[in-house]
Image (cartoon, grey):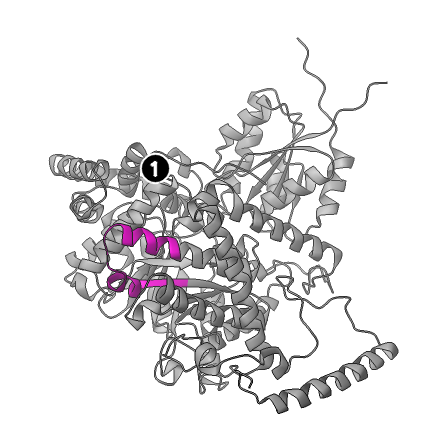
Amino acid sequence: MEQERKLRILIAKPGLDGHDRGARVIARAFRDAGFEVIYTGCHQTPEQIVSTAIQEDVDMIGLSILSGAHTYSFPRVIELLKMNQAEDITVIGGGIFPLEDIPRLKETGIKEIFEPGAKLHDITTWVKENVKPRKAITG
Amino acid sequence: MAKGMFTESALERMEKEYRDWLEEYNGALKKMPERLQRFSTVSDLEIKPLYTPLDIKDKDFSEEIGFPGMYPFTRGVQSTMYRARLWTMRMFAGLGTAEDTNKRFHYLIEHGETGLSTAFDFPTLMGYDTDSPLARGECGKCGVAIDTIDDMQRLFARINLEDVTTSMTINPPASIIWAMYIANAENEGFNRKKLGGTIQNDCLKEFIAQKTLMLPPEPSLRLVVDTVEYGTREVPRWNTISISGYHIREAGSTAVQELAFTVYDGITYVEESIKRGLDVDDFAGRLSFFWNSHIDFFEEIAKMRAGRRMWARIMKDRFKAKNPRSMLMRFHTQTAGCSLTAQEPYNNIIRTTTEALAAILGGTQSLHTNSLDEVYMIPSEEAVLIALRTQQILAEEVGVTHVIDPLAGSYFVEALTDKMEEEAMAYIHKLDEMGGMVAAIERDYPQMEIADAAFHFQEQVDKGEKVIIGVNKFPSGKPDLEFVLKIDDEIERMQVERTNRFKEERDKDRFARAMDELRRRCEGPPCWENNVMPALIDAVRAGATEQECCDLYREVFGTYTDPGTF
């Protein structure tokens, strides 16, 4: 039986804020959990993030933002994934969000939002349980 | 004979008594063990149960502790400290449009704030005007949007800029924003020689921690030195760099790393300015520092005391400064944003109070106290007032300002101060060996040291080894605040229109000539004749926007993008 390949995860920082502590910590935690991790670095547009996700053939995108611009960038990432027929890439988010924004972000297609205080182990467990490698693109 | 403050016979007696006490202590622990397996600071520096004169037995009072306002300045930069003048209460403020922020400035001044501090929004910090596609969704969110000199005028309307000092947290575009500030102040009738304030202008810590990235390190340093040179000649009351540990700490560093990397950044700026041909005693007195006051009370006090002593020694021994003012580590402090919690946010008032007290006992010159809702957003008026009142109560009710450096002589605080200096100096030697900070940044060294510390701390929190009340101990799951400030998305459209109209109405020839001169200076070798500041002042007066000047910088000097290592 063919072994299931490792999950490939893109950690991405949309927007112009440089608060990358959380992004870098979670990237390490995912790597330690046995996933393949790519980190975009700061200051990425939704267009750049989606293009990297497709090029790198990732199974999940983790968006980290603390600037308050999530109301624009998160739905935009989802929209661009759909436009590229890549909506099967799971998208999760982390950072600082006013409480009332969270249901709205989930409605747009963000699978899960992890707020401050979430434990690294809980986040990696969630990923193991909820994200499966995408079907190989043939042809 | 012992060289320290204690006689040999006294020390001998203490050593015996210490052994006796330790025996008692260990005996008592057999009945009831210590609460923790290991006691350590928030930076994970191990702390003993008791400190005695034995921990500082070799200390030379005059050489290492001394008197306030006197070398090595361990006890404070002024002889009088808070007996004569309190620190400047300087609340970091910026939200929405320039008018919104101006209103907040006036509100804070009315309630007793004594200095201004400006928070810019992310597009402004990164050198983009509000109409840039990269600025979508960010306008006014984490600070104020400043695109033009007209925005600057609205920002400081009805404020006497010769009376108040203004701090501006701006880094890669610092020269441009400062030019707008100077030009606007002069337009309003103020004398540039009398303007007081600070631009953060600390490009090195951007690569290390804050990640407001624009140009590569070398041209970034050139622009910093241009501002140092210009300030020295033309704006003598201005602090041209605020050498900042704050962001290094927020990115997850330890207290020692914050101290070491920041002091080394300072060393680099001094070296670069001397290379330009400036005399150390002409400019060093206008360098200022910016510390984070984190949650571990004594560690922060020790860090600030150690910082003053280190800087004085470095300026005297390494750079041969002669003027005592060149040796002063004057600093602003902000309580630690990263110590605040989104859960049970009212607890943040207690955290901030403790951190502010540490900053005061550490001898700060200026202080921002975080608001309880600052973990979510720019603070609301209600929350910012509590934060300002926190400083005022500490200043005037609790009596901690009556005595200068009241913790001097504490065996623990002195020993911890020594430890901070010793460990930070070890980093400084290492950075010297690496060939300096730019070389170290290129090797990702400070960045990875900080990432290691941040990850280690998160693991400790997850395991419960480091306690955060309301988060990993006694979590109540209570919902968050009701009065979180909202910035209207509509202001983005309004600001874009305003900036576009401004560009249409300017004198196109005058603007083009000013930009040509700026380009000529940027392309030329760094020297006073090619200093960008006079050209920038002309350019912003001629209607250049922040982004237009930054685009020119990016074109001439190249850009730098985050390597994205973890």
Residue placed most toward the observer, B278 or A123: B278
Read off the magenta span.
B267-289
Q: Quadrant of residue B118?
A: bottom left
Can you say which quadrant of the picture contains the N terminus of chain B?
bottom right
What's under tag 1, amino acid-wise? Asp
Residue placed most toward the observer, B186 or B360: B360
Tell me if residue A94 can be seen: yes
Classified by dominant secondary structure, the portion drawn in magenta counts as: helix
- Label 1: how many residues lie within 10 Å, few (<14), some (14-19) or many (20+)? many
Q: Chain of mark 1?
A: B
Residue B542 in the image: state x and y as whole percent: 16, 43
> Which residue does the numbered mark 1 point to in the structure image?
B131
Is A53 on the left-hand or right-hand side of B380? right
Residue B144 in the image: state x and y as whole percent: 37, 52
The residue at the point 37 percent across, 59 percent down is: B242
Can you say which quadrant of the picture contains the C terminus of chain B?
top right
